[in-house]
Image (cartoon, grey):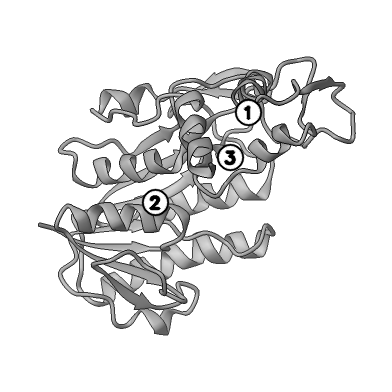
Amino acid sequence: MARVLIAGCGYVGRTLAAELAGDGHSVWGLSRSPDALPRDVTPLAADLCAPESLAGLPPSLDAVAYLAAPSGSDDDRYRRTYVEGLSNLLRALDQQGQVPARAIFVSSTAVYAQADGEWVDEDSPTEPAHFSGRRLLEAEAVLHCAPSATTVVRFGGIYGPGRTRLIESVRSGRAVYRDAPPQFTNRIHRDDCAGVLRHLLFAADVAEVYVGVDCDPARDADVQRFLAAELDASPPRAVSADDPALRSARGNKRCRNDRLVASGYTFRYPTYREGYRAVIRGMD
């Protein structure tokens, strides 16, 4: 069994920690306030942005997963959380003479700026115009300088239990979508996020980068219509691209998960249909 540190035990991290502990691994959950961690996960109170708090990392770690998330959506917080936080953790491991066999960093498809419905995979250009994508790319570069075998997972939009904004929008009749051109969206259920990371932590032959999305990069309109049918709600409305009711979107792309599937991972929720049905059942 392995000794695993999860740096950032939030929405996905707690689920990953629970699964790894259930497998019999020794798991530490690092967080500023590591309360409400899953059973059998050892809490580790530390601040990734405060290097002095990382002096007491557990020894002899086999793997590290970095899932920290900023507490706000501004450039400084993204830089501190992703670039500086990851640098601090890797430096602390080095100072303690630790070289885990594998280090994984959770990134985002925000590193891709494609906006015309193009297909995107791990080899597509990463030229983000927004600071969020730029900071994530900086952090990816930091990770790949580590002495461990390193892997980046670029997740799409994460949904699941407790993340019901779109469901409530459709249920209430407030949901709208852009009439033209179609807006493609890329999603992955929280449980598949944890499943992907669990798989890649221990897979024998792992690439440096994976796109983490489900098997159906669907039109926003199709997702909303599906939810309306499941909820017996009014169909969503089509609006023009400049309608103030339309949520802004920084990209419009279709992400491929071929490399992830080829690695041997089997999705629990292959599309938004299975995933959202499970979320809706959990709300009843």
- Circle 1: element type: helix
Q: Nearer the viewer, mark 1 or mark 3?
A: 1
- Where residue 133 is drawn, which disc sits there? none
From the top left corner, tell me how far across and down residue 134 is, in percent. 60, 47
In the image, what residue occupies the spot 65% across and 62% down? 72
Quadrant for the N terminus in the image? bottom left
Q: Amino acid at mark 2?
A: Phe
In the image, what residue occupies the spot 23% across and 75% down? 58
Task: Find the residue positioned furthest to the right.
Answer: 243
- For label 1, the crowd category at 10 Å Cα-Cα, with few meaning under 14, some 14 to 19 and many 20 or more, is some
Is mark 1 in CB contact (under 8 Å) with mark 3? no
Q: Which residue is mark 3?
A: 110
In the image, what residue occupies the spot 49% across and 37% down? 281
Give the spatial CA distance, label 1 vs label 2.
Answer: 36 Å
Q: Is residue 62 left or right of residue 280?
A: left
Q: Which residue is mark 2?
A: 105
Q: Amino acid at mark 3?
A: Ala
In the image, what residue occupies the spot 31% across and 25% down? 261
From the top left corner, tell me how far across and down residue 224 is, in percent. 66, 25
Q: Amino acid at mark 1?
A: Leu
Q: Is residue 129 left or right of residue 247?
A: left
From the top left corner, tell me how far across and down residue 219 is, in percent. 63, 19
